[in-house]
């Protein structure tokens, strides 16, 4: 193809059942976007909600490599609308790549647009600074540092443990930069709390609850690195669970409570449920047995792939299958040196995993892989997976859901193009625009 535009248009023509919005969204997520200085925020002192770096960097360069975007943060997300493709409202998580063919810039009238191959392809909206970000905790910390919101304000993202105890080349997941992201923010002198105090979290939520008068924030996610020993004297289930217990006692029923943790034994999963968690995300990362061992060495060493899957199925007995939503990192299936060489092979493998879980009523979801340059797979695969893989995955995902009579999972906002707010992949944009079941289902 002579240009990125030609490639994108070819895929839209070949896969007409995948929304055109999702094609652009996946390309932006997999390859990043450049920002003209006119499109950057004024950090927490401005009118635009800045990128919070809520767990991973999700950038194609380190902070020193991002230029002005490292000093004046880009927006947390952007919204695409209109343009020559008549795009419906599409929320996209920002992943900065100064070398991207996509660029966000203001025109001569100050209106932001997305440009591809030098042509304006859509209007760009940026998230306004929420009122709750303008208020600090009593100790001076910002709400954005303690309890940032993403997905256009829908989700409060509580990374309460900012590092991972899978550490070093023999344990860290090969696509994950959580530990580097912690190091780079500390090196830059930015506030980046390693272990968040439960009282700080509660105070930040008090501020959000007070000033989020429209009740746009609907769910919270408790997450962080894997815990193989203890943190603050607590094992993984008790560490993450005690935040949920405190939140549910202070704000009963205010938000849908979700936790992202390892696939834990049944008794530990029951503790999550007892603490008030409603949705459990025991992420399986990649389906293929060999790739799991190669790319998730810590998880293979401490738990093992087969046991991980057994624990996911066991957790459905506690939470109900619909409320167990494991994530996988879409695209690492094709990462060198061990990944599949063709899109056909990668899609066949991933679909096998989807069918395994969906046949049991469990609906996985996925995050579009961003090849961060400080990770082993990011270094060897700077361009990520082919866009065609991501488009065909959306097609396979929807078809598999239909095969098993499943609907969009709870806790992700509305599905459908023009309605979805989930910003780190297009799976919700690609599902039918039916009314969502927002509350987690009880067993």
Image (spheres, rainbow, N blue to C red):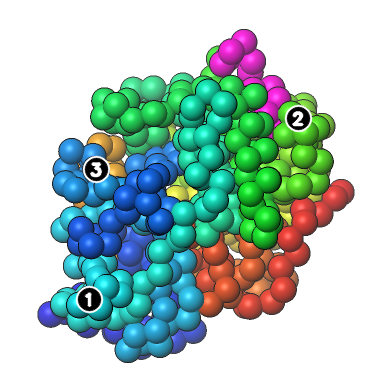
Residue 266 placement, left or right of 106:
right
Q: Is residue 371 magenta?
A: no
Residue 308 placement, left or right of 178:
right
Q: Which residue is rendered at x = 77% and y = 53% of the image?
A: 440
Q: Looking at the picture, how far across and down is residue 29, in whole percent? A: 36, 60
Q: Which residue is rendered at x = 19% and y = 48% of the image?
A: 68
Dividing the picture into quadrants, the one containing residue 241 is: top right
102 lies above or below 215: below
According to the image, label 2 marks what residue? 245
According to the image, label 1 marks what residue? 107
Q: Please, what secondary structure does the residue beneath circle 1 have?
A: loop
Main secondary structure found in the magenta portion: helix
Q: Which is nearer the N-term, disc 1 or disc 2?
A: 1
309 lies above or below 408: above
Residue 337 placement, left or right of 368:
left
Q: How crowded is the residue under tag 3: few (<14 C-alpha within 10 Å), some, or many (20+)?
A: some
The reply to whether the C-beta atoms of the residues labelled 3 and 2 are less than 8 Å apart is no
Q: Looking at the picture, how far across and down is residue 163, in whole percent? A: 44, 26
Q: Which is nearer the N-term, disc 3 or disc 2?
A: 3
């Amino acid at each position: 193809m002579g240009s990125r535009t030609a490639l994108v248009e070819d895929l839209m023509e070949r896969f007409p059942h995948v929304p055109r919005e999702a094609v652009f969204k996946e390309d932006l997520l997999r390859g990043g976007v450049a920002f003209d200085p006119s499109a950057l925020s004024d950090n927490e002192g401005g009118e635009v909600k800045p990128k919070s770096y809520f767990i991973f960097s999700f950038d194609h360069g380190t902070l020193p490599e991002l230029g002005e975007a490292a000093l004046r943060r880009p927006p947390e997300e952007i919204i695409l609308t209109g343009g020559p493709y008549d795009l419906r409202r599409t929320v996209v998580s920002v992943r900065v790549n100064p070398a991207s063919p996509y660029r966000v810039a203001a025109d001569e009238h100050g209106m932001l647009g997305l440009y591809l191959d030098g042509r304006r392809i859509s209007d760009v909206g940026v998230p306004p600074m929420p009122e709750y970000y303008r208020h600090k905790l009593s100790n001076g910390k910002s709400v954005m540092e303690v309890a940032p919101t993403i997905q256009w304000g829908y989700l409060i993202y509580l990374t309460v443990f900012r590092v991972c105890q899978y550490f070093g080349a023999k344990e860290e997941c090969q696509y994950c930069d959580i530990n580097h992201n912690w190091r780079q923010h500390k090196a830059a002198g930015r506030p980046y709390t390693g272990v968040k105090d439960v009282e700080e979290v509660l105070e930040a939520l008090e501020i959000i609850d007070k000033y989020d008068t429209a009740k746009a924030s609907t769910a919270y996610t408790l997450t962080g690195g894997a815990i193989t020993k203890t943190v603050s004297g607590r094992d993984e289930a008790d560490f993450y669970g005690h935040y949920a217990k405190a939140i549910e006692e202070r704000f009963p029923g205010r938000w849908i409570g979700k936790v992202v943790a390892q696939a834990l034994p049944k008794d530990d999963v029951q503790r999550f449920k007892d603490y008030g968690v409603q949705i459990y995300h025991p992420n399986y990362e990649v389906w293929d047995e060999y790739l799991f061992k190669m790319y998730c060495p810590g998880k293979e060493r401490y738990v093992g792939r087969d046991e991980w899957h057994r624990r996911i199925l066991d957790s459905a007995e506690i939470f109900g299958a619909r409320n167990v939503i494991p994530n996988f990192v879409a695209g690492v299936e094709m990462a060198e040196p061990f990944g599949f060489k063709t899109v056909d092979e990668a899609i066949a493998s991933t679909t096998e995993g989807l069918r395994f879980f969906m046949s049991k009523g469990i609906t996985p979801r996925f995050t579009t892989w961003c090849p961060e340059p400080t990770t082993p797979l990011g270094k060897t695969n700077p361009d990520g997976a082919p866009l065609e893989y991501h488009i065909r995955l959306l097609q396979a995902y929807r078809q598999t859901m239909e095969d098993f009579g499943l609907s969009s999972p709870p806790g992700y906002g509305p599905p459908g193009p023009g309605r979805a707010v989930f910003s780190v992949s297009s799976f919700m944009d690609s599902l039918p625009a039916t009314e969502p079941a927002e509350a987690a289902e009880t067993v």
